[in-house]
Image (cartoon, rainbow, N blue to C red):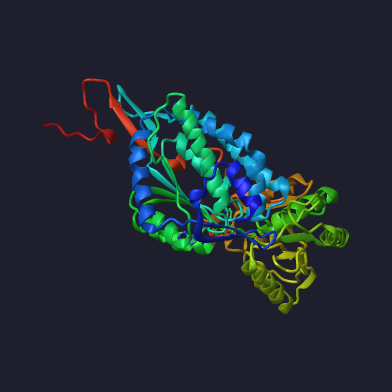
Amino acid sequence: MSAGTRILLESLGVTSGHTGGTLKVHSPNTGELIAEVVETSVTEANARIDAAHQAYLQWRLIPAPKRGELVRLFGEELRAHKDALGKLVSVEAGKITSEGLGEVQEMIDICDFAVGLSRQLYGLTIATERAEHRMMETWHPLGVVGIISAFNFPVAVWAWNACLALVCGDAIVWKPSEKTPLTALATHALFERAIAKYKAAGYAIPEGLSALLIGGKAVGEALVDHDKVALVSATGSTAMGRAVGPKLAARFARALLELGGNNAAIIAPSADLDLSLRGVAFAAMGTAGQRCTTLRRLFVHDSIYDAFVPRLKQAYGSVKVGHPLEDGTLIGPLIDAQAFQNFEKALDEARGVGGKVTGGERVDINGHQSHYVRPALVEMDAHMGPVLRETFAPILYVMRYSDIRGAIDLQNAVGAGLSSSIFTNDVREAELFMSVAGSDCGIANVNIGPSGAEIGGAFGGEKETGGGRESGSDSWRAYMRRATNTINYGTTLPLAQGVKFDV
Ligand code: NAD
């Protein structure tokens, strides 16, 4: 293991027992092998899931505000170790410094949200048609929640799920991306410190409440197939969702799917072009185009195309590509060689159907030991070919439009339905875009790009994005089961709908 990585891991409490295994971890920043991590066998994975189920049976009995105290302590650990964990995200996932730190901040924010939520897991009282009766809804813990996460948000997505599931009374089992096991080990070590402090404060906590499964598809499948896992929240490609979703449906388990996006923005004639330029640049190029919410398709009105697109091309030419921990870098590396091949393939395909490519060259940062590219802007005459699918790399397809309804139809004419934006100062266009006849995505923004989200809102998308919602709003309900209770406090037994059954 590299000395720098060892020091970071030790500062985050990861013990040497996890290293020296078979899973090789390369930093996308340098291409260097930074660690070899011990993988979890399927047998061990099943044992941890069984243990988590036993832990759930105890944890569900603890009052929710007391469960919230554990999440509050975890938030304190994250605050104390934000710099180190943020740096590890940069080293392992290739995010620039502010984005690595931003990911940890998002974890802290969801801790705060979940602590508040632990006192607000409320149900309804519902009007009943029967005299001297009361009808209500109660929310109960669900069971073991499996969390499968992707490489590009190696820790925040786990926290979105884990913090809510814990206050809801569930046990959690995490299968992080095989590309980012170190950040998962570090996060789990911080969580274990929070558990130790919780115990020291006199609270009871069952063993095995939170487990980590290190490895690839095989341990992910073990989690999906285990009959004691009540809900699997799976974040990743649509291909992964297509494999996981039917298996969960077959055993009637719940699925919360957060899959790929092919996000669009519309730049309307009245748009503030300076603001739009900044919004588009961040959404399309940020995180080297490796966000599920990355802007991939841009529809620019004919009347402003020639004023806007040359400025955008200039931004594409000047943005700094480089090592993510170096000052001033805005674009870090692609995650691996496969991602680079996918990038090149999509650009070749676009050229083949008449696309005009600006940028897209490979950038030599360290003798091509890793995969840095200049983001590509591709002017297209038609909405076709590679434009219709997600390529997880910094490619922005730009097209002209003349009619807002036609632009909205095109923005909706792809499989994915995650995020979308319109830049306009015309209230009719803005309202149309957000209306029933507007964007069909889970996220529809006005005058901000489609990329990134605050934890307070429900996050997720429609169609091939999977339909799941996590993080804020009432997403917590996915982690609980609902019971309808009817109570008769009278002495007669009236039946619903006037049914008579006298015996
Ligand atoms: P991926 O689909 O390759 O892997 C995601 C996770 O699924 C990994 O942990 C992987 O081991 C696991 N996995 C793969 N096949 C599995 C199977 N058959 N059974 C169980 N587990 C399995 O995705 P990736 O390359 O890590 O991430 C990029 C993708 O994730 C992009 O498509 C991106 O849009 C998407 N993503 C979506 C969201 C969202 O919230 N909608 C967020 C982040 C990333």
- Above or below for 267 versus 108: below
Foreground of the two, 270 or 485: 485
Regarding ligand 1, which quadrant of the image does it lie in?
Answer: bottom right
The residue positioned farthest toward the bottom in the image shown: 352
Q: Quadrant of the C terminus?
A: top left
The residue that appears at 46% across and 37% down in the rendered structure is 166
The residue positioned farthest toward the left in the image shown: 503
Residue 203 image point, x, y percent: 42, 26
Q: How many marks?
A: 0
Residue 50 image point, x, y percent: 33, 47
Residue 20 image point, x, y percent: 51, 57
Foreground of the two, 292 or 26: 26
Image-based side of 425 in relation to 175, left or right: right
- Above or below for 494 versus 96: above
Q: Is residue 470 visible?
A: no
Image-based side of 431 in relation to 281, left or right: left
The residue that appears at 48% across and 56% down in the rendered structure is 38
The residue that appears at 72% across and 79% down in the rendered structure is 352
Q: Quadrant of the N terminus?
A: bottom right
Image-based side of 100 in relation to 424, left or right: left
Q: Is residue 489 visible?
A: yes
Residue 499 image point, x, y percent: 23, 35
The residue that appears at 41% across and 60% down in the rendered structure is 246
- Above or below for 207 versus 197: below
